[in-house]
């Protein structure tokens, strides 16, 4: 039985993939990044300024690459104990005296990525 079908130019896949990557990066990626930057709490501005978007092999990633507390802001933190790493005690401006540990009550979530991702977008 003879096969009949449509033959595509072998470079078509590369063109389609490039178009998808471009759309993800410059249309959807820019929109999600912009919304995330608008939604993020701007205490010092470090998290806001660290937000980036990148596309690789038709996968869009939006987030912070170098702000170590980005997930804690998005998801919140449970109560936890803070212990000194390099010294014998913890101290900060305004503290009555150095302490060996601090019982942190945790922080409430302040989502900025999820609301940006789930924002309704029109074509």
Image (cartoon, rainbow, N blue to C red):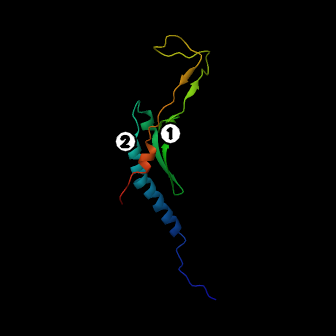
Query: Please, what secondary structure does the residue beneath circle 1 have?
Result: helix
**Residue 121 picture location, percent across and down:** 37, 55
Q: Is residue 2 above or below residue 110?
A: below
Q: In the figure, residue 27 lies in which quadrant?
A: bottom left
The residue closer to the viewer here, 94 or 77, is: 77
**Residue 118 picture location, percent across and down:** 43, 51
Residue holding disc 1 = 75
Q: Kindly report the distance in space between the C-alpha atoms of the residues bearing marks 1 and 2.
A: 17 Å
The furthest residue to the right: 1
- Pointer 1: residues within 10 angstroms few (<14), some, or many (20+)? some
Left or right of 58? Residue 2 is right
Q: Residue at x 45, y 44 (%)?
A: 113
Q: Nearer the viewer, mark 1 or mark 2?
A: 1
The furthest residue to the top: 97
Question: Which quadrant, please, contains the N terminus?
Answer: bottom right
Left or right of 85? Residue 105 is left
The residue closer to the viewer here, 31 or 116, is: 116
Question: Are the two marked residues, 1 and 2, in contact with CB atoms closer than 8 angstroms?
Answer: no
Q: Is residue 81 above or below residue 109?
A: above
Q: Residue at x 45, y 36 (%)?
A: 47
Left or right of 70? Residue 37 is left
Q: Is residue 77 visible?
A: yes
**Residue 25 picture location, percent across and down:** 44, 53
Residue holding disc 2 = 38
**Residue 108 picture location, percent across and down:** 47, 34
Question: Which quadrant, please, contains the C terminus?
Answer: bottom left
């Amino acid at each position: 039985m003879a096969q009949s079908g449509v033959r595509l130019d072998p470079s078509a896949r590369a063109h389609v993939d490039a178009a998808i990557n471009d759309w993800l990066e410059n249309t959807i990626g820019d929109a999600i990044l912009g919304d995330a930057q608008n939604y993020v709490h701007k205490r010092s501005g470090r998290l806001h300024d660290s937000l980036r978007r990148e596309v690789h092999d038709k996968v869009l990633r939006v987030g912070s690459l170098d702000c170590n507390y980005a997930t804690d802001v998005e998801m919140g933190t449970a109560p936890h104990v803070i212990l000194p790493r390099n010294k014998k005690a913890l101290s900060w401006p305004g503290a009555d005296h150095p302490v060996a540990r601090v019982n942190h009550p945790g922080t409430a979530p302040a989502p900025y990525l999820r609301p940006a991702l789930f924002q309704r977008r029109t074509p």
